[in-house]
Amino acid sequence: MTDTLQRKPVSQVANSDCFTEESLTKLKEIMYEMRAEAGNHLFWEGDTADKLYFLKRGQVKITKASDEGKSFILYVYNTGDLFGQVDPFQNSVHSFNAEVMENSIIGVIQQKDLEVLLWQHGDLAVEFMKWMGLMHRMTQTKFRDLMMFGKPGALCSTLIRLCNSYGKNHGSEIVITKKLTNSELADMIGATRESVNRMLGDLKRGNIIAMENNYIVVKDLSYLRDICQCENCPVDMCRI
Amino acid sequence: MTDTLQRKPVSQVANSDCFTEESLTKLKEIMYEMRAEAGNHLFWEGDTADKLYFLKRGQVKITKASDEGKSFILYVYNTGDLFGQVDPFQNSVHSFNAEVMENSIIGVIQQKDLEVLLWQHGDLAVEFMKWMGLMHRMTQTKFRDLMMFGKPGALCSTLIRLCNSYGKNHGSEIVITKKLTNSELADMIGATRESVNRMLGDLKRGNIIAMENNYIVVKDLSYLRDICQCENCPVDMCRI
DNA sequence: CAAGAAGTGTGATGTAAATCACATCACAAA
DNA sequence: TTTGTGATGTGATTTACATCACACTTCTTG
């Protein structure tokens, strides 16, 4: 979560920013490209986890379904993001689902190939370690935000993360350039649509946010920060 | 979370099991040893995060304090565990506190030194990547357990994790060989002492668990599994 | 453009869990 | 032995949030 001034233009922010141009090229060399249509799944819970995915273009969300049919959105990945699971077990399986949200072009990396690459290139290994550290930290901070500050805190944290992932500055306001339904927001914080609706209503009435042709506009970021005790961590960390 | 038969003796389970003997030796060569007394802190929120810690002996918990003075226990590390933060930012700071619970002997690794080592040794880099993946997954599964199955689910998941970290089989029962107060359990699942007390009472009445001179004994692991929809993942992953 | 689908907004009610308030209980120190 | 201290156990009350129910709005698409 960052000062509005520090924010990079939306289009440049991706978690593969951790890598240098050369490293990214090396990674790209061991990828094979595939296309996936919106609605399809890259993997399901229980599938073998032995691949990484580089989102050349598109959007993918990582979810967990509960028995009662509710689904919890853990991450949303966008163009330029790298994601997947690296485990020390041979028969490791996914605990989550990866659902394609927009038609996407995806570079697939086999864990075996990645291991060879890391083995050969020390600099890539170091960058890769840092990327993994970043991803882990993103999970931890999200965990904290969703556990410690109630549903309003979780929502405010999510709005801040959305600003960091999709925000465009308009003067002192930040437009979240991604349409989101109340249900989607609810699934991101483990709440119900109705609760989100009421909370958003409160924020609108308090002049913290506003809607501009169905996009959320954040008018008072510092208020959101206070609610979830945001510590102004790096933008790259506090994302969706 | 595993079948009782698969469970390794407590003393052998540590997250540094990801590494081969040789790799661990290399890591140990770049450590400097320090002693820390119970009650002290290895780091506080806001401190620079540029070190890893290898717990040669002792116990350390990673916590987050909320404004209202409540504290949430994210991890408890034991002898043989490696922990710490690796971030791609130069001025990265900790989001959590590390409190020493027992007098400990700790090997400290500077991130800079680690980078050199990873750069030089491909096999270590690959193992390190897997270790990081394991740690991340541990966080994710804990996240899921605490978010999706209510407080009873969170408690059951935590009891299973405690079995995996500290469990000793006694016939079909598992003794959790670590004394825990209701408050500590509460801090692990983000609940209150009273709630934990009531939930434990329910489990005792249902003959799922019992107390034997202040140690928790799990008598019906499968019941706990059902409550938190445990998928029987590897022991090494589902830990505290 | 009509009509169904998908999304929003909001009241009423139910329920899980926090909070408050004490009564024990265990045990260590004076 | 008393006294203090931390932990446990349990009822009564409050609160946050889910659930249910339904009206209203806005987007689709035939």
Image (cartoon, coloured by chain):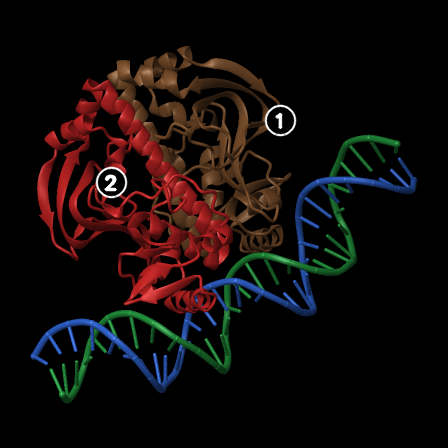
Chain colours: A red, B brown, C green, D blue
Chain identifier of the residue bearing label 1 in the image: B
> For the residue labelled by badge 1, is the local secondary structure a helix, a strand or a loop?
loop
Quadrant showing the N terminus of chain A? top left
Residue B185, above or below A189: above
Residue A101, above or below B25: below
Picture residue at 32% right of the left edge, 29% below the top: A130
Report if residue B109 is visible in the image.
Answer: yes
Most foreground residue, A47 or A176: A176
Report if residue B237 is visible in the image.
Answer: no
Q: In the figure, is residue A211 to the left or right of A151?
A: left
Picture residue at 28% right of the left edge, 48% below the top: A96
Which x, y percent locates residue B146?
44, 50
> For the residue labelled by badge 2, is the local secondary structure a helix, a strand or a loop?
strand
Picture residue at 12% right of the left edge, 34% below the top: A31
Most foreground residue, A71 or A177: A177
Q: Badge 2 is on which residue? A: A83
Q: Amino acid at mark 2?
A: Phe
Residue B38, which numbered label? 1
